[in-house]
Amino acid sequence: MPSAYSTARSAAVLRWLLGVGVAAIALLVPARAAFTVANLHCSVLLSPATAVQLGLRNGPDAGSIYGEKFDHLARLIASADADFVALEAVAAKREVEDLAVRLSGLSGATWKGIFIPGASKYAARNLAVVYRPRRGLEITGAGRIQDLTDVPTHLVFTLAVDGTACSICVVDLADPEGVNPATYAVQLKALQAWAARQSGTAIIMGAFNDEHRKLPPLFSINERLGWPATELGNRGRDYIFSSRALPLGEILPPPFGQDPGEVVRARWTDHFLVKALVP
């Protein structure tokens, strides 16, 4: 018959073995890494070379202005420490690839860019993304889709994020010629319907035409933050929506002061970076 000492010792050994087993299992199961998304309207990121190709006007100091704007936007994006950054008002593939290279140099991490020519009737109003590849993050698709033909300026990305399906729709609904209420209502309805069809997490981000915009039943980081301004003029029309509640987010204005002139604006952007943590 075992003594009380040997019984206690056996129980202690068993508890130790169970603890080792749990620790080993924890090591085998990868932890879900944080996934942050961000949105930045570039107010036209246009290189002199692309301007020539598109037949657009290009001033004598456009090269130096572009160089400053390019560097400023790269630094703003790098400071956000996001994984996936949507960009609006991008001229061409050249600008996105150059931006990814600059971001890699600034952050010490690898960045890549994806550019797909848009369907906007305005020159240099394309959409793109820059992102940081990492283990557990896989982009499985990118392009425009038939379901969103009512939203001409859109791109849809499908991702696997640490084993979880995610669909991200980047849009630019800001119309320089003004808002047509009927057209805008159709676009919003199409985006809500797209989000409802997604089996995983659905995210919509980009520039819209109005402030305090809601897309029920989607959650908005803008509403959670108290509807902050996201561009000069104290307006808030750059949004991140998600089918899952977004616990954390922030707005990062470019460090150009309260009232920058047109020249300063050309070297930055008049929109702020919007960021959110996706749970």
Image (cartoon, helix red, strand yellow):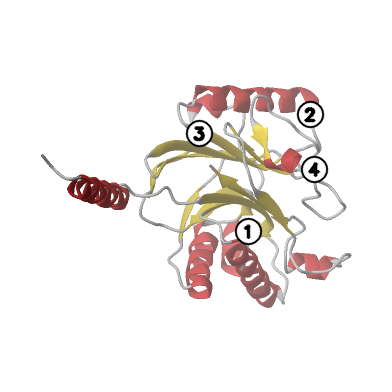
Q: Secondary structure at mark 3?
A: strand
Q: Circle 3 is placed at which residue position?
A: 201
Please indicate, yes or no, whether residue 174 appears anywhere in the rendered image.
Answer: no
Please say if the residues under marks 3 and 1 sit with CB atoms less than 8 Å apart. no
Q: Tell me which numbered mark, 1 or 2, is placed earlier along the sequence.
A: 1
Q: Which mark is residue 180?
A: 2
Q: Which mark is residue 124?
A: none
**Amino acid under label 4?**
Gly
Give me the C-alpha separation between circle 1 and circle 2.
29 Å
Give me the C-alpha separation between circle 2 and circle 3.
30 Å
**Amino acid under label 1?**
Gly
Classify residue 163 as left or right of residue 186: left
Q: Nearer the viewer, mark 2 or mark 4?
A: 4
Q: Which mark is residue 55?
A: 1
229 and 7: which is toward the camera = 7
Residue in view at x 39 percent, y 57 percent: 134
Q: Tell me which numbered mark, 4 or 1, is placed earlier along the sequence.
A: 1
Q: Secondary structure at mark 2?
A: loop
Percent position of residue 34, x then y? 49, 51
Percent position of residue 162, x then y? 39, 45
Q: Tell me which numbered mark, 3 or 4, is placed earlier along the sequence.
A: 3
Q: Secondary structure at mark 1?
A: loop
- Total numbered badges shown on the rendered structure: 4
Q: Tell me which numbered mark, 2 or 3, is placed earlier along the sequence.
A: 2
Q: Circle 4 is placed at which residue position?
A: 226
**Amino acid under label 3?**
Thr
Give me the C-alpha separation between circle 3 and circle 4.
23 Å
Give me the C-alpha separation between circle 4 and circle 1.
42 Å
Rate crowding at label 2 as few (under 14), some (14 to 19) or many (20 or more) other CA atoms within 10 Å.
few
